[in-house]
Structure formats: C-alpha cells, structure tokens
Image (cartoon, helix red, strand yellow):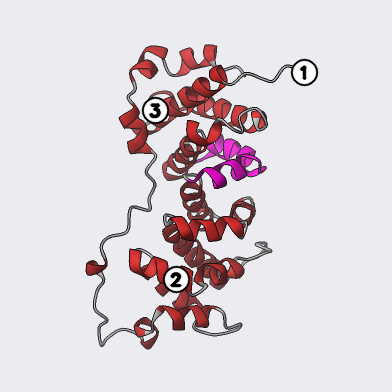
Amino acid sequence: MRIELRQATALGTATMAALSIGCMLVWRATDAHDPPDDAEVNVASDTLHPQDTENVYDLVQTVRTPGSPHVLRAVRRLGDLSVFKRFQTQIGDYGGIQALIDLLPIDCRNMDSDSKDLTVAILVALNNLSVHGTNHSIMHAAHVEFLVAEVYEQPSLDLSVRLPCLRLLCNLAMWAESSQTLLALPVIHTLAADLLTSSSADWSDKILQLFVNLTDPASLASVVLTQHAAVESIVDATISFCEVEGDHVTSRQHDNAQIIVRNVTLITSSVQPVQS
C-alpha cells in the first residue's frame, strides 16, 4: 500500500503526528446527533393533519398497508418521531424498522418523484433510528447495509436521494458490524471514485466522514488484511482528493483526511500478514 510517501507529500507527517485523539472523536460524529430528551416532544396541535396525531403503532400499520395513500405521510411522521429516544424504542418494538426496510425500492431505475420522496423519507427515518443500539441490531440483521449501498450505486439517482443514503451509511459505519460489512461491498470503490469527481462540498464531506468511520481502528483491525483492496481504495482516493483540491480543501476535509491515513497507517503497521 503506497501510503507513507504520498502521506508525507499530501498531508505532512508533522501535522499528522500532532493530531490529538480528541479531534478524531469530534469528527466521528455524523449528522444524526444524540436524540433530545423526551420532554422536548411537541404537543400535537389542532391544526395538524389527523395522521400526525396517530400513535407509533398506527403509523407502523399504515406503513405496512400496501397502496395506502398515507404511507409517505406516515413514514415522514415516523422520521420526525425517531429523533426522540422514547419513540426510537417504540418504533423498533412495533416492527417499524423492518416495515421501513421492506419499503426500500429494489429497482431504482426510472423512479418518479413520489418514489424518490418516499425513498428519502425512509432513509431519513432509518438514519435517525440507527443511532440506537437495539435498532441498529435489527437493521444489521435485515442486511440494511446491502440495500442502502445498492440504492446509492444507482447512477440514475441524483444527490437528493444519494446524500440521504450517504448519511445513513455514515451512521451505520459507526457500528463495527456494519463497518466491516460495508468494507466488503463494491460501494466502497464507487464512493472512492465519487470523492474524486464530486462537484458538491457536502457530498465530499460526507464521503470523507464515512471513510473516517470505516477506518476506525476498533473495527478495521480485524478485517484490514481481508479487505486490503477496499482500504487501499479509501486511502488513495483520500490523498488524491487533497492533492487535486489543494488550497480548496477545507479544514474539516483536511482533518478528516489526516485521520483516515493515520488510522490506516496505524493498523497496517501493527497487523502483519500471516506467514504461510
């Protein structure tokens, strides 16, 4: 893996050595913050649509009803409620996570605007729910990583759908099981290519954040030898991105790039191949 020489050129070893562990922990945070206290839940207003006053159980049943005209509204409402810890648990207990996963499109080609809106609403809800340990276990058991990766890889989809996919992948990658699963998928190479061709700063930021989570030493150490190609793809894309962008690299992008290369260097120098 051609890390050391290019690392010195692109990032500067002195700066990398000075980077603190605290900085890494800060930037591992993704868009989905810890849910606020339940006390912050707003009381239902008389002006809300009747669907907005239904409880979690009713909303999940609506999501499970094929052809219901209220599915999109129910999914969005579950997404709103999934910000709060109490509702996160309820949604999981009532089977809402599996119901949402079952709604993810199998074929994303030629999606109309309604299908895109529904897909985005599902991804937003799952993103919020993925920060809960039990809920993540349900998602991982349902192979959500494969499904979301397949949606992201559809070239016909625009950023309005792919960015929510990326946010969910970022959250999933904070869990070791999902991180190791994602490293084995072809989507890693797609993401590496997208980083080098992205015309959106938000897109680049999210890909780098995902790479930070994927290269966390706690989950990377056990798979670095078997997923060598994925790790090399991540490092090469990260360094090339910094070289191409030059002075246009933001401080956050620069810091995340340092973390990625440092993490991989740390792991690859401490894990040696088994001698046959």
Report x, y in % for residue 94: 49, 75
Instruction: Judge the density around disc 3: few (<14), some (14-19), many (≥20) Cα neighbours within 10 Å.
Output: some
Mark 1, residue position:
276
Please give left or right for residue 37 compared with residue 181 in the image. left
In the picture, the quarter occupied by the N terminus is: top right
Q: Nearer the viewer, mark 2 or mark 1?
A: 1
Instruction: Judge the density around disc 2: few (<14), some (14-19), many (≥20) Cα neighbours within 10 Å.
Output: many
Mark 2, residue position:
91
Report x, y in % for residue 232: 61, 27
| Disc on the earlier residue, 2 or 1 | 2
What kind of residue is marked 2?
Ile
Up the image or down, 186 lies above or below 39; here it is above
| Disc on the earlier residue, 2 or 3 | 2
Do residues under tags 2 and 3 come within 8 Å of each other at their CB atoms?
no
Q: Main secondary structure of the magenta part?
A: helix
What kind of residue is marked 3?
His
Q: Secondary structure at mark 1?
A: loop
Mark 3, residue position:
254
Q: Secondary structure at mark 3?
A: helix
Question: In which quadrant of the rendered view does residue 273 lie?
Answer: top right
